[in-house]
Every structure is written in structure tokens, then in C-alpha cells.
Image (cartoon, grey):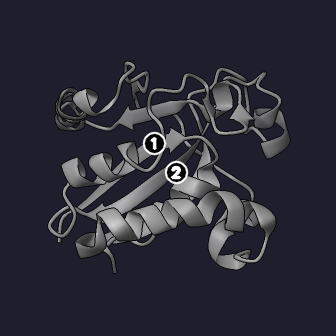
Amino acid sequence: MKTEIATFGGGCFWCIEAVIQRLKGVESVVSGYTGGNAPGVPTYREVCSGKTGHAEVVQVTFDSDVLSYKDLITIFMTSHDPTQLNRQGADRGTQYRSVIYYHSEFQKQTVEGVFAKIQSFYTTPIVTELSQTSIFHEAEVGHQDYYNNNTEAGYCRVVIEPKVAKLRAMYADKLK
């Protein structure tokens, strides 16, 4: 077993968390915040204000012998719209930016390769930010495992469920 960490965001962390949790090789997915410039530990309310500079992200612990980093990033990049700057659907602001925080030079090079490979599938440029990892702050307990704990909530049914259905259709062989 080869355990690695990946950190990325693409809109609301609830959506990304729900998709990534379902993949073989994923050991944990923690919703949180990173990439900001405000001192201290940010709260959800502060991050949502857009004033802290943080992005909503997930930090994924995975077994790269089961799920390669390249496959993980490819699935992430196709689970949201990487051509939308600072937004996903109705969620708008820098806190919802598409971003990948790399933890090693290997991860950075892998992401650059995935970007080059999938750009041709989009009619507009990929705007996903690629940055070196920074301090990760775990989100409050109510934001962890959100979809699994709230499947009947309107946001989950309308916004998250279609993303999970797309995952099932595109990557059935990668699911737990």
C-alpha cells in the first residue's frame, strides 16, 4: 500500500467530496480550506465571505497502488467545469475556484500532463489554478460527509446527485 495525499477544489467542497469518496483506493476525504491569506483558522462563514482568500477544498488520502494520482486528477477535472473562473454553477467567488494544490514535483507534472490531455475536450481554456500546497484547515464537523448525511436535502438532490450519477456513468470501473 502506498498512501498519498491530494488537495483540490472545484466549487462547493460537498460536491467534490461526494464524488471522490466513492472511488476505490480512497481512504478518506476531508473538507476544508486552503490557499488563503487571512491569519488564524478560518470559519465557513469567513471563507464564504470571500475575504480570506481561501478556497473550499478536499484533502484526499488514497492508496496510489489502487488509484493513481493521474486517474484521481482526471476524475476530479471531469467532475466539475474547469473552464469557469471563480465559480461552479450558482456558487460564485474565489472561494469556489477550480484549484489543485500539489504536494510534490511529481504531482505538479502529472497535473500539467492531465491539463494538456483534456484541454481539447473544452471549447474554452482550462482556468484551474495549480499551486503548491499550503496550510490546510479542516472545515467544521457539519461540512464533513455532507452528501451521505443529507441525501434528501434539496442541494444534494439537485446539485450533487447529478455529479455522482455522472461519476457512475463515466468511471464505473473505479467505484468501490
Label 2 Cα neighbours within 10 Å, binned few <14 / some 14-19 / many ≥20: many
Compare residues 166 and 32 and report the one nearer the observer. Answer: 166
Compare residues 61 and 167 and report the one nearer the observer. Answer: 167
Q: Could you say where residue 138 lies in the image, as x and y percent from the top left?
A: 63, 52
Q: Is residue 29 visible?
A: no
Q: Would residue 51 appear left or right of 174 to someone viewing this image?
A: right
The total number of labels drawn is 2
Tag 1 near tag 2, CB within 8 Å: yes
Mark 2 residue type: Val
**Residue located at (65% from left, 57% from top):** 159
Q: Secondary structure at mark 1?
A: strand
**Residue located at (79% from left, 43% from top):** 43
Q: Could you say where residue 133 lies in the image, as x and y percent from the top left?
A: 42, 33
Kindly indicate the quadrant of the structure image that contains residue 150: bottom right
Distance of label 1 from label 2 (alpha carbons): 6 Å
* Screen quadrant of the N terminus: bottom left
Residue ranking furthest to the front:
123
Q: Would residue 65 appear left or right of 44 to someone viewing this image?
A: left
Q: Which residue is mark 1?
A: 8
> Which numbered dot is residue 58?
2
Compare residues 132 and 55 and report the one nearer the observer. Answer: 55
Kindly indicate the quadrant of the structure image that contains residue 39: top right
Q: Could you say where residue 76 lies in the image, as x and y percent from the top left?
A: 38, 49
**Residue located at (33% from left, 53% from top):** 75
